[in-house]
Image: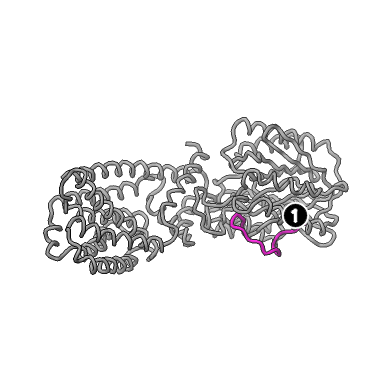
Amino acid sequence: MEYADNVSNIHDRFSLTLINPASHYFSLAGSLIAAVVIVLATHLGYFGDAADIVYRIPAVVAVLVVTQLLDTRFTKKKEYSKSLHSSLFGIMLWVAAILTGLLAGFVLGKEPSLFLVTFGMILFASFRIGIYTTTLGTSLKKTWAICLVQPLAMFLVLAPQDMWLPLLTDPLALGYGAAFLIIASSWSVVTDRAGRPGMKSTHRTIQAYLASQGDDHADAEEIMEERSSEASVSTSQIKFSSSNGKEFSMVLPDIHPGPYHPVGGSNIPYLIYKNLESSAMVMHSISDHALNLPSKNEVETYLKNLENSEVKEEGLRCTEPVTVKINKASVIGLLFGNSPLLFLSLSPHGMEDIPSYMKTEIEQYAKNRNYLRTMIVDCHNAMGEEISREDGEDMLKAAKSCLDTLITKENFAIEFGYANSDGMDIWAEDLGMAGLGIVCLGINGKKYFVGWADANNMENGTREEIMINFADRGLSLLEICTSDTHYAQVKVRNKNGYYHLGLVTNAAKLSSWLLEVAGDAQDRMAAAKFEILENKTHVKVMGREIYEDYSRALDNSLKISKGFLIGGLLLFVTSLFL
């Protein structure tokens, strides 16, 4: 499986986490309702006795609440919410067994079998083995000791005392129950080993991921840092200094934001932005998740070393922008001294991260034409799949044509003005902590704007609407880019795990904000010089193998789970005919 497929596969599996309720209050209410259903169905459908229901319901509910609180003492992180979630799903199995038994009795024209009440209780216990070992961090031995606590406590207040012995010693119930307890235990052992040899414990990784969703990212970062390797990463900057003392940097880090909020370098664009005194636009370079920083320690190392950047070129002049479009591909270029800056986009069609081979080919082409340092921005401004071979070839042709044209262009003195949204008190669920920024470049008596949003990609067509709104006011917006931040303002429960820019905030509102920022940038314009800075930092990056191992572990675990699920379902169906 190719690297891009591994990352995509892991990303697709994110939807499995959406099965869990968003709020523990939902799980609490759901489990209480399920407990009431169990009492009603058991006493009306199996025992044929409604007399005890009035006090059985509060008794069963009370025991459920107490044992849910007790359960938190046995879990690794002592989390009440996870206790409630596991309780809800487990008790629903008991409900399903009881109601299915009643339905089977009706269809088959026989009395519903009482053993299903006991069997359902043990199914509940079996589920607890699976959930406790995989997501709650409890050893199999400890889980066996506590798996029956909640189900059995509820059973003892559900059933009349004189029925305890016959129900709990029913050979069929015990036989089927034991089979499912063994199935659950076997499933737990096998799935934990599904990622070997690359991943020692699949369960530990799952637990670390779930903990990180509650902002406890220590375990996840430890696991990722263990698998990461040292690498030398570059960071390029175009730093503008104006005659009025203002400074601004357009930054292209070779590291990639991620792997996911709030782990590692997920919020690295904002952290670089703050490191440069909120006077920067942190672009998405041609990089991918293999260049993720795995931990906060590596992020700190990277940020600290940014101060050691070297000046590779400086000057006072640049060319007017050159735009080349070939089919879907668009490339915009400016030449600062002898260092070109290229903006690559497929908007409004969209794509995933531009692959590294395209960067290599463009840089080599530029080197053959004696350019000093080529800076390439992946605009990341429309959602899409991995770039196709045809679109990739068009983009390469456009980039090479742009480089060829820039050689022929006259250069002019530069003016610049920069502004951001920091003082505007704007907030949006699809916008990161650094907000919006605009740089206005004055070249040959004309003004050109480049817009930036600290966001994870952009809704298709949003870029075009914003550009039209600028054009309607006589303003030339060359490009609007995003940082590809993996920071999320809110907990997002969709397949992507984030809101891309324009999904929540419409283009009209974004345009109004950007136009206001552009006005401020234009007012601050002054004559300027530029410096091309480059930095090399040795940090740990996640690499490609870790994604291959994670993807394989997920696939193997799902295949194993499907097999066990089908086998367990068939075994359960046989119980309905007894």
| Magenta span: chief secondary structure | loop
Q: Position of residue 553 (x, y in %)?
A: 40, 45
Q: What range is drawn magenta here? A: 418-432
Q: Is residue 40 magenta?
A: no
Residue 288 position, x and y percent, is 57, 45
Q: Residue at x 76, y 49 (%)?
A: 470
Question: Visible in this render: residue 78?
Answer: yes
Where residue 325 sits: x, y (%)? Answer: 72, 35
Above or below, comparing residue 406 to residue 289 in the picture: above
| Callout 1: SS | helix
Residue found at the far right of this picture: 445
Q: State how many labels appear.
A: 1
Q: Is residue 254 left or right of residue 498?
A: right
Q: Which residue is mark 1?
A: 515
The answer to whether any part of residue 235 appears in the image is no
Report the side of 51 relative to 362 (left or right): left
Q: Is residue 452 above or below residue 396?
A: below
Residue type at mark 1 is Leu
Q: Is residue 46 left or right of residue 222?
A: left
Residue toward you, 197 or 521: 521
Residue 278 lies in quadrant: bottom right
Quadrant of the snapshot with the C terminus:
top left
- Percent coordinates x, y for residue 19 in the rendering: 41, 52
Q: Nearer the viewer, residue 202 or 544?
A: 202
Give neighbour class at mark 1: few <14, some 14-19, many 20+ (Cα, 10 Å).
some
